[in-house]
Image: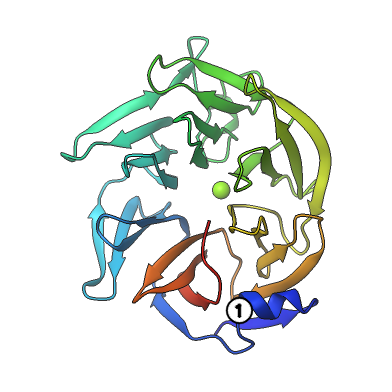
Amino acid sequence: MISIQIFDDEMREIVDSEPSSIHVGGNFQFTEGPVWMEAGQCLLFSDIPMNIIYRWSPEEDVREWRNPSHHANGNTTDQEGRLITCEHGSRRLTRTEKNGSVTVLADLYQGKQLNSPNDVIVKRDHTIWFTDPPYGIRADMVEQTANHVFRLDPVTSELIVVADDFSRPNGLCFSPDEQLLYIGDSDTEIHHVRRFRVQADLSLQEEGVFAVIHPGVPDGMRVDQAGRLYCSAGDGIQIFRSDGALLGKILTPQTASNCTFGSVSGTTDLFITATNSVWGIALNIFRA
Ligand code: MG
């Protein structure tokens, strides 16, 4: 079951102490990449080892949506509502078009195969930002010289390195005004979230370590409309105010890997992928 830990009164504005929750399902292997699809009013999420993307809606419950998924991991949508997916198995970033066809957006950097794209976000200017740690491949398969954070121009296909000094870059998200970018480093020796200021030319200026995640490591993350960071951790989702204060936690029975805002019957819900299970938690806020 889900429970709430409160460290600051602001947490009470976000979620009830005993919130209503939905157990989307519990027989998965390792869930990741939750994304709310506005057009279908449904949740998509990956089960990486099972090689499946699942679809869930209150009306139709859980069913397979893409099998095989090329061991898909992180998912998001672009400004047109199209699905953008990180694929471990094929070591590429893809876009699923409205007609269902799949377009490869990136699979090479400087002529060498990407590691295993992990998580992805889209800025309002349509640029696509993603992380490329080596979790999905064997050590002898690595071709890249670093575990990069990339920015992709989807029109020109130009791929730019925006950060090259992460050990294991993983989840990432922008502040509501997109002036700030949070990126987690899930190396077990590091386990922190760094914050960057996005420059006019879309390069990044380091602001330093924003949060140290304990227990576990930071994986996927989201920001709400008040700029609060919802970061996955070993014990669930940890919620930080933009000044870095830890407001509280949404505790999950197993390690949380990612989360996304969605909407069931008009409320705002936070969907959490937590190892074998996926949960939906009713929040009292509007999403970003
Ligand atoms: Mg991840």
Residue drawn at (77%, 57%) of the image? 213
Residue at the top extreme, as displayed: 111
Disc 1 crowd rating (10 Å Cα; few below 14, some 14-19, many 20+) is many
**What amino acid is found at the position of numbered circle 1 in the picture?**
Val
Residue 178 shows in the view: yes
- Picture residue at 68% right of the left edge, 70% below the top: 235
Q: Is residue 278 visible?
A: no
In the picture, the quarter occupied by the N terminus is bottom right
Task: Name the secondary structure under disc 1.
Answer: loop
**How did the renderer colour the structure?**
rainbow
Q: Nearer the viewer, residue 184 or 141?
A: 184
Q: Is mark 1 within 8 Å of ligand 1?
A: no
Instruction: Please say if 55 is above or below 130.
Output: below
- Quarter of the image for residue 249 reads bottom right
**x then y, percent, for residue 171:** 60, 46
Q: Where 213 falls versus 74 (above or below)?
A: below
Q: Is residue 207 left or right of residue 35?
A: right
Residue 143 screen position, x and y as percent: 56, 19
Residue 8 location (% of width, % of height): 80, 76
Say which of 249 and 10 sits in front. Answer: 10
Disc 1 target residue: 15
Given residues 134 and 150, the one toward you in this image is 150
